[in-house]
Image: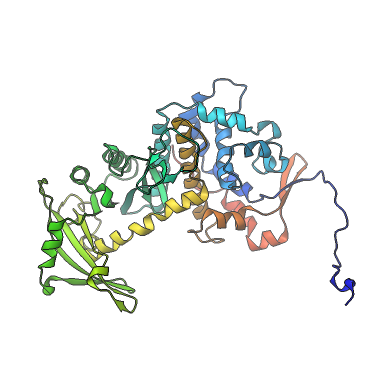
């Protein structure tokens, strides 16, 4: 067989250099347009505009824009990569910056280090305003929140302030986060040894969120908080009662609970099914010895998995503690009696409790979008990186909902979105005092790029 058989008819024979402005991140233009359209920059300028000490430097909002784009790009987690982006004319053009406006790694490091200890409160206010923005857009009658901690593994990083042993047997940070419909709407950045219910963080976060919801969204709305066993504390549960919100909390398997359940007759047990699995459940009043109040308890026992019945020793039992149906203030704002009966129903509470697993998916999504190992040795600049990552991730999630909803599934992780909607070639042409972004016909047809372009410029802005 001759070698000519394996020769390509379109063989490249040499290489050259072009002066055209090209970029491999054509989809970044949509994200930049979206950031400008939702008016996130005035909000950032309001809280952090005074960080800029000299008029010679870049505006604060432009630095934040480049940070958000850097997170969305996801090519590198190292701050030194800003030096590579600074000399990339195509990247500068696609994020609507000139070469002179691009920041270097040294500028970014100085920016992160210019914040003070109290900056976390300002970032949290921005997150809560973005939360209210989405509530007003979706207008829910029942708001279901989840409080949880997320371990950020920094075991292999150099020694950092706040990196401490966590319950996952790695050293890192363990922020407390509030989650609503796949979005992290509030967070407190903390060291690794801070357990779920450390100090008054949980109580204070619930107060702040409820106050923001009642004041800025709707005074009469039903709020329910899901908690795991790490938050099983009378102080937390009592605060929910004071705020008039419901809680669905995973209880702890104390010996007395097992003894009580063990002697109950079979006739007292009912069955809950979610099509794939069956649970037996038993309902009773519950309080710890030192508690002053009884709460509603639902003991669940998995009895059917696929086609196989589980033996007693293999059953993952759970006890759910709730004030729904006990505290009348929780459901006083229900729009109809039918909705009130639905929320009180035992099956609804069990179903909501089972959503705890899905509630942790935003943690995985955030780590896929950003990173766990933070770059600085000091706690404050690391907290700023963390909060910038949270705001970027929130905007990324809303960007999928507002712009990409018909092109890619809403639940797609950042890696998938980047490969499909960010990483494609485009050309920027400066002609007639206009900058024109050109893409291939394949991109225009498969992504319906012209529709995405219009959507990215017409979302409902964040109301300050």
The residue depicted at 55 percent of the width and 43 percent of the height is: 35
Quarter of the image for the N terminus: give it.
Answer: bottom right
Q: Is residue 233 above or below residue 411?
A: above
The residue depicted at 85 percent of the width and 48 percent of the height is: 16
Q: Is residue 398 visible?
A: no
Q: State how many labels appear.
A: 0
Left or right: 445, with 318 as reference point = right
x then y, percent, for residue 442: 70, 62
x then y, percent, for residue 213: 32, 43
The residue depicted at 54 percent of the width and 24 percent of the height is: 52
Q: Residue furthest top?
A: 54
Q: Nearer the viewer, residue 404 or 421?
A: 421
Q: Nearer the viewer, residue 434 or 31?
A: 31
Q: Is residue 55 above or below residue 205?
A: above
| Colour scheme shown | rainbow
x then y, percent, for residue 13: 88, 57
The residue depicted at 26 percent of the width and 52 percent of the height is: 229
Q: Nearer the viewer, residue 172 or 46?
A: 172
x then y, percent, for residue 200: 26, 37
Quarter of the image for the C terminus: give it.
Answer: top left
Q: Nearer the viewer, residue 195 or 331?
A: 195
Left or right: 268, with 435 as reference point = left
Q: Is residue 325 visible?
A: yes
Left or right: 367, with 25 as reference point = left
């Amino acid at each position: 067989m001759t070698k000519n058989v394996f020769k390509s008819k379109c063989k490249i024979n040499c290489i050259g250099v072009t002066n055209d402005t090209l970029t491999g991140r054509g989809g970044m233009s949509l994200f930049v347009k979206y950031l400008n359209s939702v008016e996130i920059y005035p909000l950032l300028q309001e809280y952090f505009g005074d960080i800029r000490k000299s008029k010679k430097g870049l505006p604060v909002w432009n630095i934040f824009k480049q940070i958000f784009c850097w997170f969305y790009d996801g090519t590198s987690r190292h701050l030194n990569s800003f030096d590579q982006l600074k000399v990339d004319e195509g990247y500068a053009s696609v994020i609507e910056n000139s070469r002179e406006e691009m920041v270097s790694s040294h500028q970014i490091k100085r920016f992160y280090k210019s914040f003070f200890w109290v900056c976390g409160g300002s970032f949290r206010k921005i997150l809560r305003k973005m939360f209210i923005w989405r509530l007003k857009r979706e207008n829910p009658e029942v708001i279901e929140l989840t409080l949880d901690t997320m371990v950020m593994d920094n075991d292999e990083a150099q020694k950092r302030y706040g990196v401490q042993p966590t319950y996952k047997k790695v050293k890192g940070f363990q922020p407390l986060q509030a989650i609503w419909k796949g979005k992290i709407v509030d967070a407190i950045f903390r060291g690794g040894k801070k357990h779920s219910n450390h100090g008054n963080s949980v109580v204070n976060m619930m107060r702040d969120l409820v106050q923001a919801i009642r004041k800025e969204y709707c005074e009469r709305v039903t709020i329910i908080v899901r908690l795991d066993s790490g938050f099983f504390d009378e102080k937390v549960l009592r605060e929910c009662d004071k705020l008039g919100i419901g809680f669905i909390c995973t209880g702890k398997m104390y010996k007395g609970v097992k003894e009580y359940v063990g002697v109950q007759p079979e006739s007292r047990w009912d069955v809950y099914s979610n099509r794939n699995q069956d649970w037996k459940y038993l309902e009773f009043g519950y309080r710890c010895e030192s508690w002053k109040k009884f709460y509603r308890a639902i003991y669940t026992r998995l009895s059917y998995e696929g086609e196989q019945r589980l033996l007693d020793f293999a059953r993952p039992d759970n006890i759910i503690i709730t004030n729904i149906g006990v505290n009348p203030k929780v459901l006083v704002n229900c729009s109809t009696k039918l909705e009130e009966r639905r929320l009180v129903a035992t099956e609804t509470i069990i179903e909501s409790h089972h959503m705890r697993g899905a509630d942790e998916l935003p943690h995985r999504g955030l780590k896929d979008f950003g990173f766990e190992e933070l770059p600085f040795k000091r706690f404050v600049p690391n907290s700023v990186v963390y909060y910038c990552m949270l705001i970027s991730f929130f905007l990324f999630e809303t960007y999928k909902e507002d712009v990409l909803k018909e092109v890619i599934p809403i639940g797609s992780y950042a890696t998938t979105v980047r490969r499909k909607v960010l990483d494609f070639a485009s050309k920027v042409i400066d002609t007639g005092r206009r900058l024109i972004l050109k893409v291939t016909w394949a991109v225009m047809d498969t992504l319906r790029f012209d529709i995405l372009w219009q959507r990215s410029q017409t979302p409902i802005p964040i109301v300050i």
